[in-house]
Amino acid sequence: MSSASVDLAFSRQHLQPGDRVAVAVSGGADSVALLRAIHAANQPGPSALGIGLSAAHVHHGLRGAEADADLLFVQNLCTSLATPLHIHRTSAAEYATLHGETLEEAGRSIRSSFFSSLIASGEADTVLTAHTRDDQAETVLMKLLRGAWTEGLGGIHPVLRVDVPGRPPRHILRPLLATSRAEVETYLQALGQPWREDTSNQDRAFRRNRLRHDVLPLLRSLNPSLDRTLSNVAEIARDEDAFWQTELDRLLPQLLLPGKPVRGGGRAVSTAPEQASLAIEIERLRPLHPALRRRVLRAAARQLGARLSFDETQRLLALCGFLTLPTVSARNGSVLDLAGQLRAERSLREVRLSRPAAPQGSSE
């Protein structure tokens, strides 16, 4: 491999001297570039990272000999860099069937669980993944197409906190989110460093691949700065969501009420383990800005384990009497059945939300 003096910019946020840092390496260009860049920055010198470096690879049990070759490539790369490698072998197909997920979702779940286990076991303090600005653009556009709210438009977060009992917070970091895929490939070519191509990334049966190969090139012809624009949208959305979350943390304890009102004052709280419920006084919602009303109702639903779409939130607002919809009545006794087994009931002064409690031991 060439020892050409080239650099790849990456964020050093949350990387502290003495940390044990594992770089997730699939063998693709992005992850190989990240490992090479972190390895180079960890060499002795005035700006050295001073970390304990390792790599982590997941063999998903898919693509047969191709995946085996990816693992061998990563093993050889780590050997050449004198970098320890953590390997996790699994079956994404079995996981997907067991958990009712797509293969893409199963892969993400498996990787996230593996990275968290490295941190929980103390084998790593921090895990780095090689998501780039291109990945961020794809994610934001995917979320937009699915009708995401601002928390979804925040896309790939640069820092994910991992809490481990008895230890300071740890993190999964995405230090290449400001870096383009083109910059990654230029860096590797300057090093003379090969990488692996995952042929499944060309399979247009996957929605993300259709977006990557068909939709995004067309959009970039209309806006050459599209990736940066969508990344900016993600940053704005994350900041907006953080602001609103602070407001919700302040307001929700004042707005959400347990159980039902009883004659003579006070509230009766059901002790039935099979149902969870809460209520909101409609007059306390009335003075709130419509944006805050929506967030209060959605946060209340989340506390019961349900997620509301925009249309369902509109129906709930209509039940409260803040909107007029032909299919929703705001009269006393009106009932709405929403997604996730969430039920909303209108009384004279309140809207009450209830949902069957998750079975004991459920991961919901």
Image (cartoon, grey):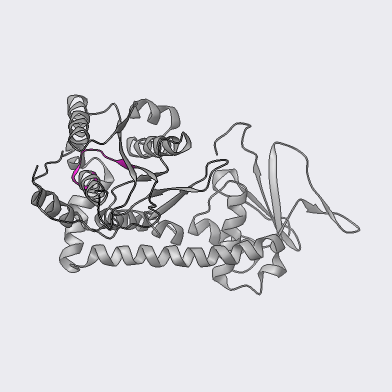
Q: Position of residue 289 (x, y in %)?
A: 58, 73
Residue 285 in view in this figure: yes
Q: Position of residue 239 (x, y in %)?
A: 45, 66
**Quarter where residue 79 is shown:** top left
The residue lying toward the viewer, choosing from 157 and 314, is 157
Residue 327 in view in this figure: no
The residue lying toward the viewer, choosing from 84 and 234, is 84
Looking at the image, residue 345 lies above or below residue 35:
below
**Quarter where residue 29 is shown:** top left
Where's the C terminus, which quadrant?
A: top right
Q: Is residue 270 magenta?
A: no
- Image side of residue 24 versus residue 210, left or right: right
Looking at the image, residue 309 lies above or below residue 36:
below
Residue at the right extreme of this rendering: 264
Q: Position of residue 324 (x, y in %)?
A: 58, 68
Q: Position of residue 251 (x, y in %)?
A: 65, 65
Q: Which residues are magenta?
A: 22-31
Please give the name of the residue rendered at 39% of the width and 28% of the height, measured from the top-left corner: 95
- Image side of residue 14 versus residue 58, left or right: right
Total tally of numbered discs in the picture: 0
Please give the name of the residue rendered at 78% of the width and 52% of the height, measured from the top-left corner: 260
Where's the N terminus, which quadrant?
A: top left
